[in-house]
Image (cartoon, rainbow, N blue to C red):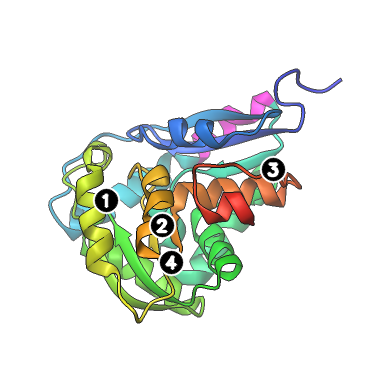
Amino acid sequence: MGDSLGWRQKFAVLIPSTNTSVQPEFDAMRPVGVTNHISRIRIPNIALNGDADFQRLITLIADAQDEAVDAVMSCEPDRLVLGISAETFWDGLKASRDLKKHLEERTKLPVSMGSEACAAAFAALGMRRLGVITPYQPVGDRNVLRFFEESGFEVRRIKGLKCESPVKIAHVTETELRDALIEVDGDDIDGIVQVGTNLAMARLAASAEIWLKRPVVAINTAIYWHALRESGITDRVSGFGALLERH
């Protein structure tokens, strides 16, 4: 007999301790028989007043990551799912692949992470020319741009919201996100992607697909979709847009 609740898959979900959006959004997407087991990377809620602060945040996450990974392994999960995005884009495609390899070797588990999940989602949805929304400072935007371009995608517009702290990322309203969607939209793109896992945008992205008439990928949806599909779970989950409903 397997786990009584997670009899299909037990996901170990790694998130920063400041993140309040991944856990509820992932749980809302969870099919029966799949369970999410959160491990928090302990970081302070530092002020983000510019590029130097944001670079420090990335360093803090990287330094504390392995401890959080090791802590969740004792529940014997089936897959490691990174509920983090900035770190997975940092320093481009090769660095992203190196991070995945490190985590696979440390855990001996398959890994789903935002950078790779976005690329897979774009392929499924026919997206090559992108509008991008982030909560980051400019250095974060540059790293996202670098990753997507090195992966063969074209970023036509990028909107960084320059959130003032990790916790305040989750304070961005749907009205602000709607305005950002309109700002990066245009006839020269195939779809829009939102990165930054503490931006709560999964349900808004689904509704935005209706009025923008193009794919809108929230990164939490892309990550969870990737984790499910790579685990052989093909359930269609309504309310989160085309990716989970039709792919």
* Picture residue at 56% right of the left edge, 55% below the top: 243
Query: Which callout, 3 or 2, points at the residue further toward the start of the chain?
Result: 2
Task: Look at label 4 and name its amino acid.
Answer: Arg
Which quadrant would residue 15 be assigned to in this image?
top left
Kindly indicate whether the residue at mark 2 contacts the one at mark 1 (C-beta within 8 angstroms). no
Residue 21 on image: x %, y %: 38, 36
Q: Nearer the viewer, mark 4 or mark 3?
A: 4
Q: Residues within 10 Å of mark 2 (few under 14, many from 20)?
A: few
> Gap in Å between the C-alphas at discs 2 and 4?
8 Å
As measured in the structure, the alpha-carbon distance from the residue carrying label 4 to the one carrying label 3 is 23 Å
Residue 67, magenta (yes or no): yes
- Could you tell me how far apart the alpha carbons at marks 3 and 1 are, in whole angstroms? 39 Å
Q: Residue at x 45, y 52 (%)?
A: 219
The front one of 170 and 180 is 180
| The N terminus sits in image quarter | top right
Disc marking residue 210? 2
C-alpha distance separating marks 1 and 2: 38 Å
Say few, some or many: other residues with alpha carbon within 10 Å of mark 3 (under 14 / 14 to 19 / 20 or more).
some
On screen, residue 43 above or below 190: above
Foreground pick, 89 / 119: 119
Residue segment shown in magenta:
66-75
Kindly identify the residue that appears in the image at 76 percent across and 21 percent down.
Answer: 3
| Residue on which the image places disc 3 | 235
Image coords of residue 158 (percent x, y): 28, 69
Query: Spatial distance from mark 4 to mark 1, Cα to Cα?
Result: 36 Å
The three-letter amino acid code for the residue at tag 1 is: Arg
In-image side of 183 versus 155 (left or right): left
Answer whether residue 105 is visible to the viewer in this image: no
Question: Which residue is labeled 4 in the image?
Answer: 214
- Tag 3's secondary structure? loop
Residue drawn at (42%, 39%), measured in percent from left and top?
A: 64
Q: Secondary structure at mark 2?
A: helix
